[in-house]
Amino acid sequence: MSSVRTVPLFVLPMGLFPLTQEPLRVFEPRYKQMLDDCVLGGEPFGYVASAHPPKALGGWALPGQYGLLAHAEDVSEQGTNLLFTASGETRFKISRVLPASLPARDFGEIFPTVDELMEEYVDDDPDGKLYLRAEVEELPPLEGTVEDRRWEILVRAWSEHIVAVDSLVMASGMGLEDVLPIMEGEFIPYTESGLWSACQSILSDYHDRQRALASASANEVADVIEEALEASMAQMNV
C-alpha cells in the first residue's frame, strides 16, 4: 500500500529528480519558514515543478502533479538569504494542495520577517503556514533496470548532446572524443542514480519531466530520455 503524508511544498519552475542534488538560495519568508520547520523537525519537503500552464491558489503558483521528497542539507546564512542543498529522494503524486494562510502579495525589495507575517494569521489559524502544503502519495521504486547495451547507446547519445550544446554556445570546444570517455567513466555501468542524472541534464520540457517522475519502470524513464534527445538533436540540426 502506498504511503500518504502531508508535506511542505517548494515550488520552482523545473523541479528535481531522485538521487540528484541542487544548490538553492531562499529569501522569501514562506520558504524561510519551510526550511526552519523541515530542518528543526528533520523532515523532508516536497520539491515540485510549477504547473504548466500556470495556475495559482491565493496568488501562489500551484505545483504540477508529480514531484519528490527532498531533504535540505548544508544550510547556511548569507546576509538575509538562506543557502542549502536540496537532495532528491522518493517520488510522489500530489493528491490535494493545502492553501497557505496568507495570500501572495508584493513586498518590493524588503521582505517582512516570518514572525511579523505569522502575527497576521496565528489567532485565526494557529496551525497555518506561509507556504503551500500537499497531501502526497509516495510512489514505489522504479521497476527493473536498463539493459547494458541500451544504456551504453543512451550515454553516447547524451555525450553527443553535450557536445552539440557546447558547440552552439561556443563554450569549451570539447569534442565527442573528449566527452565520451568522461561520460562512460562516470555513468557506465548503469545505475539508477545515472538514469536520474540523465533526466536532470537532458529533460527541459515540463511534460517530459513529469512523465519521467510518473514512470513505473527504469525503461519507461529511458524512453522519455531517448525521445527528448532525438527531438533536441533534430531541433539543433535544423
Image (tube, rainbow, N blue to C red):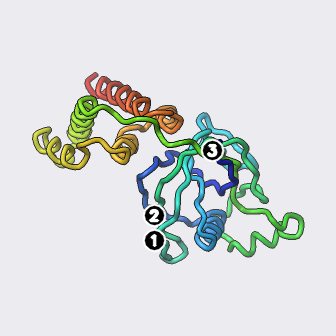
Disc 1, SS: strand
For the point 21% across and 34% down, the residue is 156
Nearer-N-terminus badge (3/1): 3
- Crowding at dot 2, Cα within 10 Å, few <14 / some 14-19 / many 20+, comes out as some
Q: Name the residue beneath numbered marker 1.
A: 74
Q: Quadrant of residue 220?
A: top left
Residue 79 position within the rendered picture, expressed as x and y whole percent measured from the top left:
51, 77
Q: Name the residue beneath numbered marker 3.
A: 63
For the point 39% across and 40% down, the residue is 199
Nearer-N-terminus badge (1/2): 1
Q: Name the residue beneath numbered marker 2.
A: 85
Q: Is residue 6 above or below residue 167?
A: below
Q: Are marks 1 and 2 in contact (CB under 8 Å)?
A: yes
Q: CA distance from mark 3 to mark 1?
A: 25 Å
Residue 15 horizontal side relative to residue 163, left or right: right
Amino acid found under the numbered disc labelled 1: Asp
Disc 2, SS: strand
For the point 76% across and 52% down, the residue is 99
Residue 195 horizontal side relative to residue 92, left or right: left
Nearer-N-terminus badge (3/2): 3
Q: Quadrant of the C terminus?
A: top left
Q: Are marks 3 and 2 in contact (CB under 8 Å)?
A: no
Q: Is residue 75 above or below residue 18?
A: below
Amino acid found under the numbered disc labelled 3: Pro
Disc 3, SS: strand
Q: CA distance from mark 3 to mark 2?
A: 20 Å
